[in-house]
Image (spheres, rainbow, N blue to C red):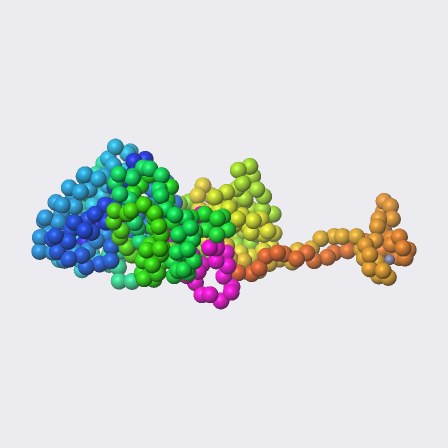
Amino acid sequence: MIIAFDDTDSRNTGMCTTYLGALLFEELQQYGKITNEPLLIRLNPTIPYKTRGNAAVALQIETERPEEVISHVIERVEDFAQFQDENTNPGVVFIHAGQVESCREELANFFLETVRQVITIDRAKEIISRNKLEARGYKNGRGLIGALAASGAALAEKWDYTYELLAYRQPENWGTLRRVDDESVWKADNATYPETWDNVDMSNNLVVCVPHSVDPVLYGIRGKNKAAIRETADTIEGENTERTLLYRTNQGTDMHLIPASFIEDLQDLHSYTIQLKVTSIPHTIEGGHTFFQSTDERGNTIDCAAFEPTKNFRELVRKLIPEDIVVLSGSVKEGTFNIEKLEIKKLETKSELVNPTCSSCGKKMKSAGKNQGYRCRNCKTTASELEMVEIPRELEIGIYEVPPCARRHLSMPLIRRDKDGYIHPSR
Ligand SMILES: [Zn+2]
């Protein structure tokens, strides 16, 4: 049977759905055998009412005692869920072995939908009742959406995935400052990158695999190669961990991005990849957010933004000029495109008018007075008009990404793509 749950955590009090997943992964083995790699599923990252990371968990167990499994899980969810937090609305879904085939296709599709679309609680409840699934939704039941999605991930035949190893702190340390030796993280990263990624952020000189939130996670190591992930975890020095669990996850896959051709197709709270033409010179407002406008083939325009947390990525964006052709990946919020990745397809030639050059001595001419043209003081040569010269762009064709410190869980790090020099990974 499949056991999936969501939204047991809280932004304020430090519970974490993945921690409950790690506990249950161990505890449920008394009833049978866990048969899948535990799943950590990230849902649509733009949903405003999400708790921390919008993550749901699914485990699959082969058991002769399904009723005991169900009561154990429900008891644990009720023990751990942070019901007092108004944004915490837990949901648990159970899919019995006999139900797996009949709901496989619908839930596999639902999984992709929850990553890309905005799903109502009623929709999740309707699927649960029509398929006669055993489920518990607490409070407004929003967690049922993620729980169903995670079940769908367990049922889906094929999807791109990566891994994250999560190490949890000893409970007595929860809420206190984390003790992790930064040097050891840099060393571990150096040894395993690019088999692991987002341990550190080089351009911003930050350790990024150690969170600052109040949850029980000490660190999370992301990658595709399980041995390299374990090596990284073994190299990191710091406080004793209570337990670790390696999750298979849709993080780092770009699963949230919907291919789009026209601005009129873009909707708020969805994420896209779309080719556009820059139409304004980027400007930066107080607070450090950088904006520019761009247009599609039909002539509609949209505001595009690189927000302050994207740090050095903004320097790149500020070098764009009108007529540049770009492919943007990111999400639309309040009508603004928040950029996660930027592919530069074509750079417009940049030129400026400068004083003409003297054909004899090669020096710049000076103005000969208002409406008098230009003149070389040494050679007395003259010219009537300014000269157009090309300015180097200081930008290269290729694809760029926000730095690790600003990366969304779902965003695929460029290092996962072909290493052909056309990509410019941010490490
Ligand atoms: Zn001259």
Work out whether 22 lies above or below 177: below
Could you tell me how many numbered marks the image carries?
0
Residue 160: name its quadrant. bottom left
Residue 79: name its quadrant. top left
> Residue 362, percent across and down?
82, 60
The residue sitting at 87% across, 54% down in the picture is 376
Q: Is residue 161 left or right of residue 268?
A: left
Task: List the single residue furthest toward the bottom.
Answer: 420
Tell me if residue 401 is in the magenta stretch.
yes
> Residue 2, percent across and down?
18, 54
> Residue 223, percent across and down?
36, 58
In this view of the protein, can residue 367 be seen by the observer? yes
270, 206: nearer the viewer: 206
Work out whether 14 lies above or below 328: above
228, 325: nearer the viewer: 228
The residue sitting at 59% across, 57% down in the picture is 395
Q: Main secondary structure of the magenta part?
A: loop
The residue sitting at 56% across, 46% down in the picture is 292
Position of the N terminus by quadrant: bottom left
Tell me if residue 301 is in the magenta stretch.
no
Q: Is residue 222 left or right of residue 309?
A: left
Q: Is residue 377 left or right of residue 341?
A: right
In this view of the protein, can residue 149 be seen by the observer? no
If the picture is divided into quarters, which one holds ligand 1?
bottom right
Q: Which residues are magenta?
A: 400-427
> Residue 217, percent across and down?
31, 45
The residue sitting at 18% across, 51% down in the picture is 26
